[in-house]
Amino acid sequence: MNPWLYGVALVVAGVLAVLLVVDLVRDRAAQDSHFIGLAVLEVVMLVQLVGGVVALSRTERELEGAVFVSYLVTNLLVPIVAAFLALAERSRVGTTILLLGVATVAGLEVRLWDVWGGRGA
């Protein structure tokens, strides 16, 4: 797995989380800028999925391939589900849902890095 992509994913998730917290404190509903940020995060997750599968096919590491790929796919699906749920609830709750989705992506990224490094499967 590419450490640069890991870093980019965490930075994008972190910046988006800060933006969401600021708007949550300001009592604002989900904005278009939030969904644009979520789309950027989704593109990073898609690139990471492809890169992760390629890296898995080329590695000699001892790791559970099914667990690794399932984390990659889940990381790809979380922003989509969060966006749909936030669109269904156009209030402050929608912003909270987006924040929880971004936090979930960040948490899954950390776990994905652990699985790749062989520290748990």
Image (cartoon, rainbow, N blue to C red):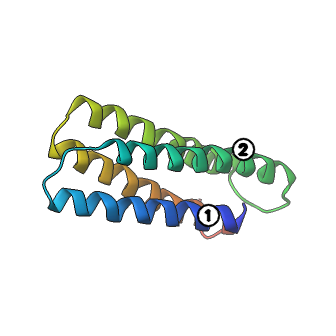
Could you say whether the residue bearing mark 2 is in a helix, strand or loop? helix
Q: Is residue 106 left or right of residue 50?
A: left
Q: How crowded is mark 1: few (under 14 residues within 10 Å), some or many (20 or more)?
A: some
* Residue to which mark 1 is pinned: 6
The quadrant holding residue 83 is top left
Could you say whether the residue bearing mark 1 is in a helix, strand or loop? helix
Q: In this view, does 21 lie to the left or right of 27?
A: right
Q: Position of residue 12 (x, y in %)?
A: 50, 60
Q: Where is residue 115 in the image (x, y as percent from the top left)?
A: 62, 62
Q: Is residue 56 left or right of residue 20?
A: right
* Residue to which mark 2 is pinned: 50
The quadrant holding residue 32 is top left
Foreground pick, 83 / 71: 83
Residue 55 seen: yes
User: Mark 2 is on which residue type?
Assistant: Val
Q: Where is residue 101 in the image (x, y as percent from the top left)?
A: 36, 49
The residue that appears at 66% across and 51% down in the rendered structure is 48
